[in-house]
Image (cartoon, rainbow, N blue to C red):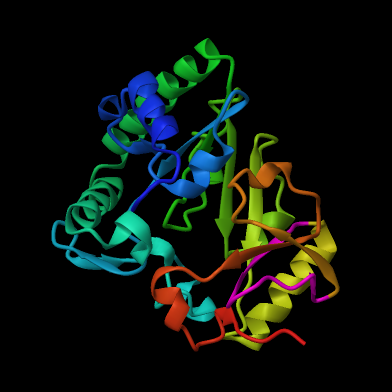
Amino acid sequence: MQFKNRPMLDNINRRFKMSDYKLLSVGSDAKTIKGNGDEYMTAILYMKSYKTYIEELGKTVNPCAFAEQASCHEGCLVSAGRGKMHNVQSARERKLILFYVNRKLFMEMLQDDITKFTKRCLKNGQQPCVRLNGTTDIMWEKFGIIQDNPLVQFYDYTKIYTRVYKDLPSNYHLTLSYSEASMDYAKKINLACADTGASMAVVFEGDLPICFLGRKVIDGDTDDLRFLDPTNVVVGLKAKGDAKHDTSGFVIRKVA
């Protein structure tokens, strides 16, 4: 991937010593770089998404439980940008395997990364922000890692609409992911947003509409700081990677 602001990326690499992080990625994609600056800095955990057979366990795991229902597995962002590179895919798979095979070690490594990242952000006068589901949909609120790091603003996109009805940690923001691959699923996302004030992310083909489902559409590609968004809006995203060819209903192609 070519970054338009190469000096900013080089500066991030120098200041955050990216090789120091075992699991998290800092400044690894153009979208989060747009939101990084004097006030915020984002680290993301990328792992292999969807179904993966783990030999050590003798079974297939799925860190994206609603992927088939939303039909996002074919147009997943895992294939966008650097995600197409073999070494990147291998690294993400290794992290996923570690998460399932040695959860204790994984969580220790993750906490170490978050602690290191937080210290560097605070030293630079920045708010540390962390997305743990860069390419997965794991219910991290159940693991205690968010609650144990109150100085960090965590945020994620999720297709598990029941999560927004629950009492989430105050430093964890969720944006629901919309899809019309299943109209039953689409109705449940729409209802969850109406009931809770949560916003929904919608992937569109081409230009973003002004409104969708009676809600204002904001440009979600401007930055990735979803916790700063107004409530109950549509976060419009342009189709990327394999999603450009999606016909399942995950990508909304025509808006009247």
Left or right relative to 78: residue 96: left
Residue 25 in picture, x, y percent from top left: 37, 38
Q: Please give the range of residues in magenta.
A: 198-213
Picture layout, residue 96 above or below residue 15: below
Judge left or right: residue 42 versus residue 180: left
Residue at image position (44%, 45%) is 4
Whether residue 207 is in magenta: the answer is yes
- Residue 248 x/y as whole percent: 50, 87
Using the image, determine if residue 194 lies above or below residue 12.
Answer: below
Position of 151 with respect to 244 (left or right) is: right
Instruction: Please say whether residue 12 is one of the residues in the magenta stretch.
Output: no
Q: Nearer the viewer, residue 180 or 203?
A: 203
**Nearer to us in this view, 156 or 238:** 238
Q: Is residue 73 visible?
A: no
Q: Is residue 144 visible?
A: yes
Q: Residue at x 24, y 46 (%)?
A: 98
- The quarter of the displayed image where residue 194 is located: bottom right
Quadrant of the rendered structure where residue 191 is? bottom right
Residue lying at the far left of the rendered structure: 55
Split into 4 quadrants, where in the image is the C terminus?
A: bottom right
Quadrant in the picture for residue 196: bottom right
Q: Is residue 75 above or below residue 28?
A: below
Give the total number of marks visible in the rendering: 0
Residue drawn where x is 68% and y is 58% of the image:
219
- Residue 26 x/y as whole percent: 40, 35
Q: Is residue 153 left or right of residue 243?
A: right
Front in this rendered view, residue 2 or 105: 2
Place of residue 135 in the rendered image (x, y in percent of width and height, measured from the top left) = 42, 57
